[in-house]
Image (spheres, helix red, strand yellow):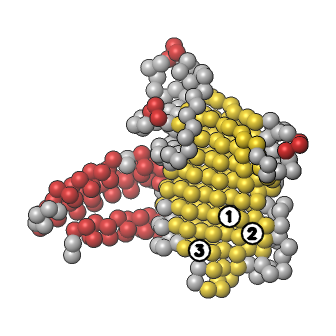
Amino acid sequence: MKLDRLIWGILLLFIGGVLLLENFGLIEFYWRNVWNFWPIFLIIAGVNILFNRNNSQTGSIVSIAVLVVALSFLFYKGQQEPTRGNWWGNHANKDIDINIDDDDNDNDNDDNSDNDTAFHQLSLSEPFVAADNAKKTILNISGGGISFNLNGETSELINADVKKKHANFSLKKLITDSATVLTFSMDNKKNKFNFGDGGNDVDFKLNKAANWDVYMKLGAGEADFDFTDYKVRTFHFDGGAAALDLKFGDLLPITDVVVKSGVADVKIKIPTNSGCRIKTKTGLSSKDFDGFDKLSDGVYETSNYKTSTKKIFINLDGGLSSFEVNRY
């Protein structure tokens, strides 16, 4: 057996085994801790390149031994409860060319400039304009190494309370003929290689009167959004390693939910009186769709899908992820 195939097989067994142990409740695993030690994967790749050139049995044994030791270390670290928001993902916002530093970023805690663990508070907001409420409101979110939460409503259009350490954030608004476009983004260029304790936390407050379309691009991070009391027409997530906890209401006739992920833990809650259809393209991912009937390979529906006046469409696309959809 080729060494490359053997190494990939061990990696897949490790990830699948951890996901399975999580699903059975035997362990509590925090994938964000794995990303804190991402250089280990560079070491594994380097050892494989060095010892795979001569195809020697000794080299193969060394490569496998290094891999097993590294995965054992990650398995141990992954079970330690992390500091909230300590995800890594600095390149998730490459396609958005926004670089606006908040004015007080370099001046905060001047008397404590040597304290690398200091956090800074930042509040960003955009006003609610009643004349624009007939339009849809598009919220674009991008970044990495961030913990996002939806923390209640606001009389403004949006509030973002940021607890930041190694990044700058901006919130911009653009008015078009058909929509109000909000862009919340992170610029982490100044501290690309700072992996100290802690991370960035963002607490959003949204206006309940607006009609929301949310598009989220996250390299690595977590999001806990309870949209029960908000009119969310679209939620679209595109990310790498992430943890998502989403809850939707039934204030609109149709809600579209799209989740594309690499290695992720995704939990979605939907109301029982809404009909729901799930389409999946999930590779080796695990699926738990309680209260759904399987119609065909990759297609699931609730029993009231055809008769319900409120419908939720969910599309799930993941490589090695855990997807769970429950009704409440």
Number of marks present in the image shown: 3
Residue under pointer 2: 312
Rendered location of residue 56, percent (x, y) = 10, 66
SS category of the residue bearing label 2: strand
Q: What residue type is labelled 3?
A: Thr
Q: Earlier in the sequence, mark 2 or mark 1?
A: 1
Q: Mark 3 points at which residue?
A: 280
The residue at the point 55 percent across, 68 percent down is 317
Label 1 element class: strand
In this rendering, the answer to whether 131 lies above or below 260 is above
Q: In percent of the image, x 38 and y 56: which residue is there?
A: 75
Where's the N terminus, which quadrant? bottom left
> What type is the residue that disc 2 sits on?
Ile
**Marks 1,3: beta carbons within 8 A:** no
Tell me whether the residue at label 2 lies in contact with that at label 1, contact meaning CB atoms closer than 8 angstroms. Answer: yes
Residue that badge 1 annotates: 257
- Is label 3 in a helix, a strand or a loop? strand
